[in-house]
Amino acid sequence: MLVDSHCHLDFPDFDGERDDLIARAREAGVDLMVTICTRVRKFDQIKAVAEQYDNVFCSVGTHPHQAGEERGIPACEIIDLAQHPKVVAIGEAGLDYFYDKAPRDAQAEGLRIHIEVARQTGLPLVIHSRDADDDMAAILEEEMGKGVFPALLHCFSSGRDLALRAVDLGLYVSFSGILTFKRSEDIRAIARDLPADRLLVETDAPYLAPQPRRGKRNEPAYTAMTAAVLAETRGISLEEIAAQTTDNFFRLFTKVPKSFHTGEGLA
């Protein structure tokens, strides 16, 4: 069993095809998916997808690209939305200094609000971090000092220092199709060295399809391709990496019913 811990099934790229998409994922051994929210104001769209499928869960939050347009949404509003039974995570929120689509102060403000939501709800915060390693590490360390919260660095493409500092704080690290790219030797080296009990896999679909599908639309079934490279990188079997990353997922995403871990929750 594999889990796609981060995809965007509400995106129009998948309109009219979601039933087939879910079926292909299951055929590939990807039995659970978490579709990730990028705009609190569009949460109803995310919720509708998650409610339609027994094996799809979701998050609620604001992507750093939208941190400017959704500035001022209070923690209490996100907490209320997170009470929905299908919401198992907060975010994605974070810092993106590569595109800089929102003011950096708005991104930081949004990240801190989402951290408070994760702290109060106990749901894991899905963190987006790109070209912002120093500021991200500083905020995480400062905020963890105020009170612990569960979190993961999703679609990891940062430096070793951020990965190690995050793990020291108790965070998990999730790898996407980037891990499979030919020029991702540094990312694979980090993935090889991190503790086994902190690893997750994801697609970030429809983006970042792994080799040999790079450049095409990504989908949850391709989680298996990334998992295979992660297994090879760490010198273990695909079955072992599937079991480890799935165990890690359920340890972090505690709101997902335990029946899904045993397969009993899957129709």
Image (cartoon, rainbow, N blue to C red):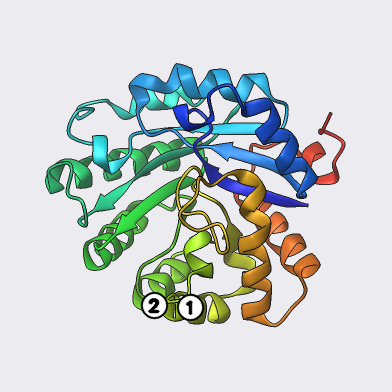
Assess whether mark 2 and mark 1 are in contact (beta carbons under 8 angstroms).
yes
The x and y percentages for residue 124 are 50, 45
Q: Position of residue 98 (x, y in %)?
A: 22, 57
Mark 1: amino acid: Ile
Q: Between marks 1 and 2, how big is the CA–CA gap?
A: 6 Å
Q: Is residue 253 above or below residue 184?
A: above
According to the image, label 1 marks what residue?
A: 190
Q: Which mark is residue 160?
A: 2
Relative to 227, residue 29 above or below: above
Determine whether the residue tagged by mark 2 lies in a helix, strand or loop: helix
Of labels 1 and 2, earlier in sequence is 2
User: At numbered mark 1, what does the secondary structure look like: helix, strand or loop?
Assistant: helix
Residue at image x 55%, y 64%? 211
Image label count:
2
Q: Residue at x 48, y 42 (%)?
A: 206
Q: Quadrant of residue 165?
A: bottom left
Find residue 87 and report its horizontal and vertical position in percent.
55, 29
